[in-house]
Amino acid sequence: MNAPLPPQVLKQHLIDPEICIRCNTCEETCPIDAITHDGRNYVVDASICNGCMACVPPCPTGSIDNWRMVVREEAYTLEEQFGWDELPVEKPLPAQGVVADAAAADAAAATDAAVLTAAAALAEPAAAYVAPGSVVPPWSAAHPYVNLYSHKTPIVATVVGNYRVTDDDTDSDIHHIVLDFGKLPFPVLEGQSIGILPPGADAQGRAHHARQYSLASPRDGERPGYNNLSLTVKRVTETHDGQPFRGVCSNYLCDVAKGDQVQVIGPFGNTFLMPNHPRANLVMICTGTGAAPMRAMTEHCRRRLEQGANGKLMLFFGARTQRELPYFGPLMKLPRDFIDINLALSREADQPRRYVQDAIRERAADVAALLADEETYLYVCGLKGMEAGVLQALKEVAETAGQAWEPLHAALRTQGRLHLETY
Ligand code: NAP
């Protein structure tokens, strides 16, 4: 059993800047706003963090799960953490007596209830936070490999394809990019993501950090039997509020040419995975480039049809217009008895705005039947803003069909049947 820590010793929570892919999941998950970031690093405020661990399972890389025993007064400040390119070497703690002397000298700090020791926090984990989605994979998911390649040891892939998948006359410049790993091992599963290290440096002269992209191809490759994978990348040309902004990595990737070499890290993600058993139904809900993992899962299901998989596939896909919907052509060629496709177009001329949650409500009877089936797994990927709306629509659909939402939501979460990946 772990002995309790003396009050002056803090088990300080830190984020490894070498592994972190700056996906913001930890900051969004933290129930007490202890995590923040600047243009470079995600950091944990030692004066707020209570070690509740809510941020640890959702982190796709494990960079969040770093701890250092420090004398409380010498805890790493936010400024120090913002400046790190790597975690500092763990310093030995002073001998017990010195710590005890420090206790006597600073009894006030010792009784400061606002800042818990990690020992106390771990003994009394914060019970309040419950993630809206699953933090475990489906029971039958295949074993994912994660963090095989890091910032220090990236793998080099060769670009073997780069195609625009939205109409040329639209502002949404979305590319399908195929990377080949040659003879090097890079095992992946649908739902996982990888990090791309864009060349060059930021304004401070430091190498750009990695940007995360979901796989758009299934585990056996964009082309079956090849050691390759694909990504869906939207060229970022403005901020969320419409100001001109050139996205470093998206512009780099949208402009790569066949034969170029790209530095890759990962793979990442061990929960947003698909079930491996044949009877499982998939309900996939996505917007824009959030279609990437849905494409991967759909294609895996299509390839295994011959092996007797017979679960249902239902897709809700939102985009501004049909011409901005990535992969529209190939998607519409899939047989209707294989996948039930529901489009929600928000800016189509002469049509009312439709979001995925509107489409879910329109298909209430079929969605309710799937929700009532314990073999159903739900995946939500895309814009952060749709998460609450989609959960609300699912709640209404379930309740209208006479199914209480709270227990259903709890079962979906705990059984690895509700996966959310929104940014
Ligand atoms: P987008 O074109 O901006 O939006 C797609 C559709 O979603 C539009 O019809 C939009 O409608 C609609 N929408 C906006 N707010 C919504 C809401 N609250 N509820 C439901 N629908 C809503 O999408 P995008 O630029 O492609 O962005 C996709 C998101 O997926 C990004 O945040 C990206 O980071 C994320 N993502 C990407 C990947 C990847 O691998 N590339 C993987 C995972 C997630 P209006 O704009 O007309 O209102």
Image: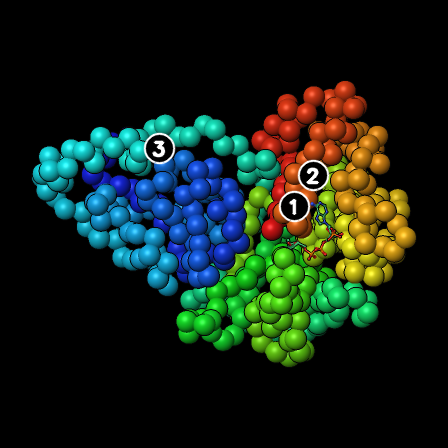
256 left or right, relative to 302: left
Residue 321 placed where, x, y %?
Answer: 82, 57
Q: Which quadrant of the figure contains the N terminus?
A: top left
User: Disc 3 designates what residue?
Assistant: 122
396 and 253: which is toward the camera = 396
Pointer 1 or 3: first along the chain: 3
Q: Is mark 1 within 8 Å of ligand 1?
A: yes
Ligand 1 lies under 8 Å from the Cβ of mark 2:
yes
Q: Give whichever of discs 2 and 3 has the lower sequence position.
A: 3
Give the residue type that dot 2 points to: Gly
Q: Which element is circle 3 on?
A: helix
Rendered image: mark on residue 385: 1
Specify the quadrant of the image occupied by residue 221: bottom right
Graded by Cα atoms within 10 Å as few (under 14), some (14 to 19) or many (20 or more), the crowding at tag 2 reads some
Nearer the observer, disc 1 or disc 3?
1
- The residue carrying mark 2 is 389
Q: Is residue 312 above or below residue 43?
A: above
Q: Is residue 82 left or right of residue 355?
A: left
Q: Is residue 164 visible?
A: yes
The image position of residue 415, as x and y in percent, is 61, 32
